[in-house]
Image (cartoon, coloured by chain):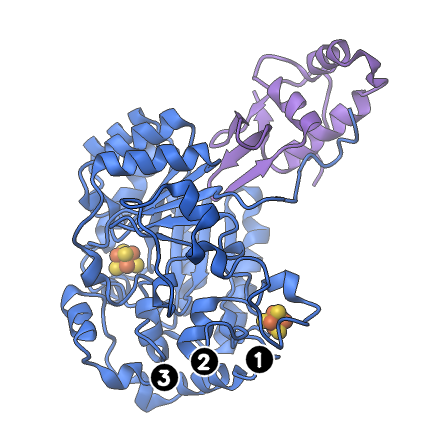
Chain colours: A blue, B purple
Amino acid sequence: MTTLNNGVEANITQTQPLWLLAEITYRCPLHCAFCYNPTDYADHTKNELNTDEWIKVLRDARKMGALQLGISGGEPLLRDDIEDIVTEANQLGYYSNLITSGVGLTEKRIDSFKAGGLDHIQLSMHDITEEISNFVTDTKTFKLKQKVAAMIKDRGYPMVLNVVIHRYNIGHIKEILEMAEKLGADYVELANTQYYGWSLINRNQLMPTKEQIDEAEKITNEFREYIGNKMKIFFVVPDYYAERPKKCMNGWGEVFMIVTANGDVLPCHSARVLPNIDFPNVKNDQLNEIWYDSSAFNKYRGDDWMKEPCQSCSEKENDLGGCRCQAFLLSGDAESADPICTKSPHRHLIDQALEDSKNEILQAQPIIFRTDKNSKELIQGEHKERLKDFKAMP
Amino acid sequence: MTQKIELSDIYKIAPHHRFQWEEAQNCYVILFPEGMIKLNPSAGEILNLVDGKNSVENVVTLLKEKFKDAGDIEKDIISMFEFALNKAWISKE
Ligand code: SF4
Ligand code: SF4
């Protein structure tokens, strides 16, 4: 045996879809202002894959080495076959995660999930106040979420709470963490809003200030010290206030594979906004050919596609040029550096967005909630004024 | 915060964690909410024996038998236990 002091093999040498994310339906009873689903989702709610088709996806991806399975949406519980999918996932050896708003999680269903071998449930929470929670989701779901949290705990599941942070709840971080503690959460993800999909068109309404974020981070660190190992807290920093972009999805086609409700296979949630790419579909092609050979998955793999300033940048391994969708939506050039980067010639677009988010007139524009009606209106070209800063529909 | 490992301690894989052999990666892995760790062969051999029954001492004995030419591996094994405990991959029975 060789040295043991660090048992971790950090380098993943070849690309492998270790994470499979099943965006199993775009239907959702909630209407979150910050939803990252595509704004044209109403076009993708038909032709959902059926149970057998999903099971084939699970089997094929598992053969390719997929290990972590996220079942998300939309609200996955709107489908009545999650039980079958979970059971199959367990038999195949996935570590499976149901990502839910809690709506539709009954005692009966959670018992079947447990019996089927579902490994954990990630519940979205929004605020400590009923008022704000109901406001940002545009539904009356606050009380229900509290009840669901108790049910998850009661079944012995690790409780993973996901809280999307924005201007309306960033002042309540401490109280949110206290609530999580009271609910017995094992993991809490404070995820600052990432501006894709619906959150992008509501950016001026959702963006907190730099001071608010710094304060929230400080409070989070203090709470971490107090709570120790009992509850793991992740604070996902927002990239707009950073100087370098994130390594989006850990690299295009590196470890994440997303299969959408209708069977399209994507390297990231919002990849469909990108121009000149035909994303393959599991109804027509084999999953391993899609991952390894399709032009879509090879398009932004590695760094050959890069332009300056990224191509000769000494930091390119760190972030691989950032997010292609963000680059395209804001600059109009999908091969440009993510405009978050201060080396990007488009950084002024981010600075402008930060300015706009302080502009009271722009702030006062109504939120466009994620609803079928709004999605259809956006598809038909309405709300033009809200899209004028973007090169395509988010 | 390093916790001390005693030879008589009995550990198991921590709740909400799963340890399994992965054919596709040819290694053992640990899976948990939002994460996974691929283990190198020696770490995998050790954790494979962490089953809520074997004491640390047993693990050492079993591995010494299995890898006769490896020399004195006790220290390495203990430090792997420490590492895994700190990462909360294992917990006491
Ligand atoms: S963010 Fe809200 S609206 Fe969007 S899918 Fe999740 S629960 Fe539904
Ligand atoms: S120039 Fe490109 S590669 Fe370099 S840090 Fe900026 S985004 Fe990353």
Q: Dividing the image into 4 quarters, which one contains the N terminus of chain A?
A: top right
Front residue of B2/B14: it is B14
Cβ(mark 1) to ligand 2 < 8 Å? yes
Q: Secondary structure at mark 2?
A: helix
Cβ(mark 2) to ligand 2 < 8 Å? no
Please tell me how many numbered marks the rendered image carries: 3
CB-based contact (under 8 Å), mark 1 and mark 3? no
Image quadrant in which you'd find residue A148: top left
CB-based contact (under 8 Å), mark 1 and mark 2? yes
Residue under disc 2 on the same chain as residue under disc 3: yes
Q: Secondary structure at mark 3?
A: loop
Q: Amino acid at mark 3?
A: Asp
Q: Amino acid at mark 2?
A: Ser
Q: Which mark is residue A389?
A: 3
Q: Amino acid at mark 1?
A: Ser
At 54% from the left and 48% from the top, the residue drawn is: A227
Alpha-carbon span between mark 2 and mark 3? 9 Å
Q: Which mark is residue A331?
A: 2
